[in-house]
Amino acid sequence: MILLAVLVVLTGCAKDRPGDKAQAAAPVAQVTIAPTPGATDVDPVAPVSVTVARGTIDQIALTNASGKQIIGQLSPDRTTYKVAEPLGYGATYTWAGTAVGADAKPIPINATFTTIKPQATIPATINIGDGQQVGIAAPIILKFAGPVTNKAAVEKALTVTTDQGTEGSWAWLPDDDGSRVHWRPKNYWTPGTTVHVAAKLYGVDLGGGSYGDSDVTSDFTIGRSQIVVANAPSHRMQVVRDGATVFDFAVSYGEGNEARNVTRSGVHIVTEKYEDFMMSNPPYYTNVRERWAVRISNNGEFIHANPESLSAQGSSNVTNGCINLSPNDAQAYFPTALYGDPVEVTGTSIALSQSDGDVYDWALDWPTWTSMSALPTQ
């Protein structure tokens, strides 16, 4: 009987021991981790964070498989930690840390996740470099080193910002070596416009298992307005700068007796220039040295000096499609030409088109151009 009484007393004391209920209560801090612990195929530029409710973060770190800590930022109230740099492709990351609740109880922060592992990454380049000054018809060309099939997703990652609020659109043009998308304004650029291009392609699904290799940007300006007015029947070419005619040259255009030597009508643009250039048009001629050559299309059309056609310049068209000037006139024009200057050719039997090379942006009217965007309602 005495033993039984003791047991009852002990049981009663254990049940009512002060502090037992507090010790049994769960910690009040609540930790939320994004992405979800154990997640796979995570976008490397998706938000990555740890948030604590009813408590604060005491210690926190996100590391890669090599132990390198990823840069992040802790909020002033110590309730949120956000990763502040892109993650790598196909990599595993580990959280380690501790949160402390309002009840002073610690909670461990432990989790892992893995990012997408692409079948391939595709780099892209912008045709206009930082600080470059270009002509008023210059297109922005984003060239991909491989095929892009998810064009809408890519286009959503592209922005063109100007200080003039310039209206323009992207258009996807055919390309035999990868993919490319061009942006041009609805009308010629306003001289002096400043332009910022941002292509946030890293982490973007390009389609076919490929992802963007890296982000690319460019900051450039539009120079003076210079338009070459080239009317083939007149046998002359005017250079109009900021509305004033600064040159009026006697020239010779394509003879036009065959399609191959018709100077194409339409808005060409200056793409490159050479003081000396070896020109070939087999079987008619090969490696002929020409001076002061300004390329205006990829079908072989140049504005250049040609002393052999001097007697025809100003009176007849005898060339293989180029615009021929005298050596003195070509040398005078050459230094004034900028990438993106428009060359407006009129009066010939064939229009500039896709078949004439990869820069024929202004040969397309605005409705056609905008229809070639992957986001036609933009």
Image (cartoon, helix red, strand yellow):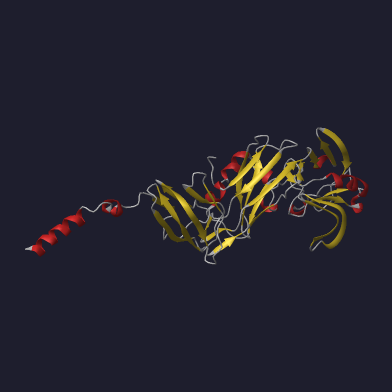
Q: Foreground residue, 376 or 153? A: 153
Q: Foreground residue, 269 or 6? A: 6
Residue projecting furthest to the left: 1
Q: Kindly tell me whether residue 273 is visible in this rendering.
A: yes
Q: Is 211 on the left-hand or right-hand side of 343?
A: left
Q: Residue sitting at 58 percent across and 59 percent down?
A: 147
Instruction: Tell me the quadrant of the picture where the N terminus can be found.
Output: bottom left
Q: Up-down: is 283 above or below 233?
A: below
Residue 41 in picture, x, y percent from top left: 46, 60
Q: Is 328 on the left-hand or right-hand side of 117?
A: right
Q: Is 126 on the left-hand or right-hand side of 282?
A: left
Among the 4 quarters of the image, the one containing residue 24: bottom left
Q: Up-down: is 286 above or below 297?
A: below
Instruction: Tell me the quadrant of the picture where the C terminus can be found.
Output: top right
Residue 78 in picture, x, y percent from top left: 49, 47
Residue 220 in picture, x, y percent from top left: 72, 44
Residue projecting furthest to the top: 243
